[in-house]
Amino acid sequence: MTDTSATTPHAAGAQLVLAAACLGTLVVSYNTTAIITALPAIKADLDIDSVTLQWVMNSYLLTSATIVAVMGRIADIIGKMRLFLAGLACFAVGSLCLIVASDAALLLAGRIAQGIGAAALFSTAVALVNVATPEDQRAFAVGLWGGMIAFGFGIGPVLGGLLTDFASWRIIFVLDLLFLAAAMFIGLRIRKSGFLGEPAHKGETIDYLGVALLVVTLGSLVFALTHGLEFGWTSPIILALFAVFAIGALAFYFAEHRDCDPLVNFGFFHHPHYVAATIGMFVASFAMWGLIYYYNIFVQSPETMGFSAVGAGLSMLPLSGLMFVCSVTLPRLLERYGLRWPIAIGMLCLALGSWLLHLTLNETPYSATWWKLLFIGFGLGLTIPLLPRLGLRVIPDADAGQGSGVINTCLYFGGAVGIASSGIITAHIRNEAVAKAIADLKPKSGEVGALVRDLAHGSASQIRHALSQFNPDDAAKAQKVLQDITDDGFSAVMLQLAIVTLVGAAVCLWLGRGPVKMKG
């Protein structure tokens, strides 16, 4: 069978493809939330500051976002399973780097390698499932694939917390290797069997100019958002980065229209349902990553709830458990009724849950918090598995790799922007509050600007050193300020997520009007 065959796939082959795709997806999603739970431990172990900690996530997300679209195109040219296997190998290399990392440089290098591997796996996994599974079974198969994302997200915080608290955060990545080995074994069997046949676009070229422009465009925006406060929003370097983003976006658009084999086929966007899928995935990912990242930082902070890594992972079970159940069951049930309203309702649940969480303070008991996470879990369980289905059902099977690659670009880029924009909010709040507090206190020594920077964004050792510059009474007051601004920052981030997802619900509801124009 080829990627474009219209014949019914052999059941055993389809099941093997589904198993391999789900294992690859599981290792990526498990790794993502496991490392988030372990971030405070990584920060303390390697003594890194808050900006570097953001890049532990953003280096991974940005790498994936900038190349996942080209991975989809490569999959259509060289074969989806071949690229899937390469992605498994690359992710394994990244995991090995993280296991032996002794400083931030090797840590970030490992995350970049994992980002490349994740881009290859995500761009091919859902496309493999979509192509290998008969039409009447695709809703269930794609739902199960989405369920693996939810299951990985759900089990990741708990396992990551257990391993971090009782062994080491590095063991998280040892576990990666076990999942990767199992997926590699199944994938090699599929490749040897020839079940998927020849790639649909074998012999066609890759749009290298489009790749370069996409990397420059997305990378400049995320770097500017992440470092805007550090360098100053009107500083030459930040203004130059925003200019590069704007020029790069325009150049990418025109270059893709002139290329006979473009990286992104803008013809896909002629269908409003595909536009809804891409915008919806950006918004859902924006909310998901922003919430998971800052929720874990908030509940594990000594100034707030002070949860252990295990406690933080267990506290997310209402979210991840419901997300898993909904991802597995709802796509198949809702397929016959259309996806417009389920996706919009999912977005509204994300907005409601985020708004409820913005009322959470450091003294708020978990008994008053857990039920708010249910709205987030339900919303993600509707949006994450249904949005790819909404987009891919209007794309020909031969272009499934490219079509899913664009949707997954939005998944990763939305997460990177979500973390970066939330970081802008929290950094601004921390800078203002710490600067005001220091102005009212009397440090023994030290330059005021450096004290503000270290207290607001520094590593654990930098914060301890900054506090030592005050007498005991003033140091206690500074500690109280840090506790209060942690509350304020988390509240502001959740409010931002509520607003963004509310807008996303309206956009998806509007674009989802009208009948589906089936693929051709």
Image (cartoon, rainbow, N blue to C red):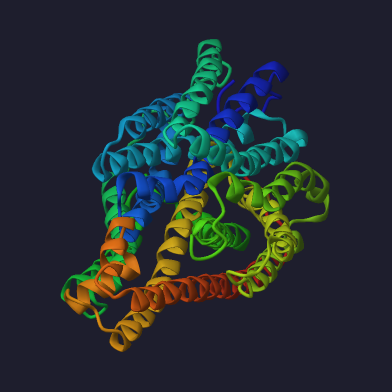
Relative to residue 348, is residue 58 depicted above or below?
above
Identify which residue, 343 or 23, lies in the foreground: 23
Identify which residue, 115 or 513, lies in the foreground: 115
Identify which residue, 224 or 72, lies in the foreground: 224
Number of numbered discs present? 0
Q: Residue at x 57, y 75 (%)?
A: 495
Residue 129, image x, y percentages: 62, 33
Relative to residue 159, is residue 479 depicted above or below?
below
Side (left or right) of 247 relative to 484 = left
Q: Residue furthest bottom?
A: 440
Residue 24, image x, y percentages: 54, 31
Q: The N terminus appears in which quarter of the rendering?
A: top right
Side (left or right) of 9 relative to 236 = right
Side (left or right) of 487 relative to 45 = right
Query: Is residue 12 visible from the viewing direction of this image?
Result: yes
Identify which residue, 53 or 164, lies in the foreground: 164
Relative to residue 81, is residue 222 depicted above or below?
below
Q: Residue at x 47, y 45 (%)?
A: 38
Relative to residue 184, is residue 389 depicted above or below?
below
Residue 28, image x, y percentages: 51, 37
Query: Is residue 242 visible from the viewing direction of this image?
Result: no
Q: Residue at x 58, y 44 (%)?
A: 310
Asked which quadrant contains residue 218, the reply is: bottom left
Q: The C terminus appears in which quarter of the rendering?
A: top right
Residue 81, image x, y percentages: 49, 25
